[in-house]
Amino acid sequence: MKTTRTDAIADALAEYDRLVEVGVGRRTAVAGALAERGCSVVATDVHERETPGSVAFVRDDVTGPRVEAYADADAVYALNCPPELHRPLRDVARDVDADCLFTTLGGDQPAIPVSRRAVGSETLYVAAARGR
């Protein structure tokens, strides 16, 4: 069992080779940890952000995505994702045939149908996206 939220989430997501983190903001620890585990990671945000050298960055808005930024992903994920972005996140994952995973803010509940996966003390929500 991992002791930190970052490690627990990175371990859970490391089953994917190519990932896109949506809305990375200033919290790049999970993306960096995934890259350290050998995953290819692209981080997106509506604002220009610094990411670890091993993490590519693309400025993008998931509510009007440039699908090419997500095209090679096996999984599209977001951390602390607000409910208004759950559907756009799932939709872009569907568009590129990738899995869709996210965590929410505090007591927010998913705004789309999901399955739940316990990851340390966190809940990772998995939305039906891939293989429709």
Image (spheres, rainbow, N blue to C red):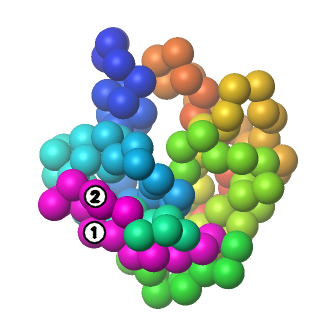
Tell me if label 1 and label 2 are in contact, CB under 8 Å.
Answer: yes
**Marks 1 and 2, how far apart in space?**
7 Å
Q: Amino acid at mark 2?
A: Thr
Span highlighted in magenta in the image: 49-62
Q: Is residue 33 visible?
A: yes
Label the magenta part by its dominant secondary structure. Answer: loop
Residue drawn at x 68%, y 51% is 127
Toward which corner of the image does residue 89 lie, by quadrant?
Answer: bottom right
Toward which corner of the image does residue 40 lie, by quadrant?
Answer: bottom left
* Residue 18 drawn at (x, y percent): 33, 63
Residue drawn at x 76%, y 61% is 87
Residue drawn at x 52%, y 76% is 60
Q: Amino acid at mark 1?
A: Ala
Q: Earlier in the sequence, mark 1 or mark 2?
A: 2
Q: Magenta stretch containing residue 20, yes or no?
A: no
Eye-nearest disc, 1 or 2: 2
Question: Residue 56 has which mark?
Answer: 1
Question: Residue 129 has which mark?
Answer: none
Image height check: is 66 above or below 85?
A: below
Quarter of the C terminus within the rendering: bottom right
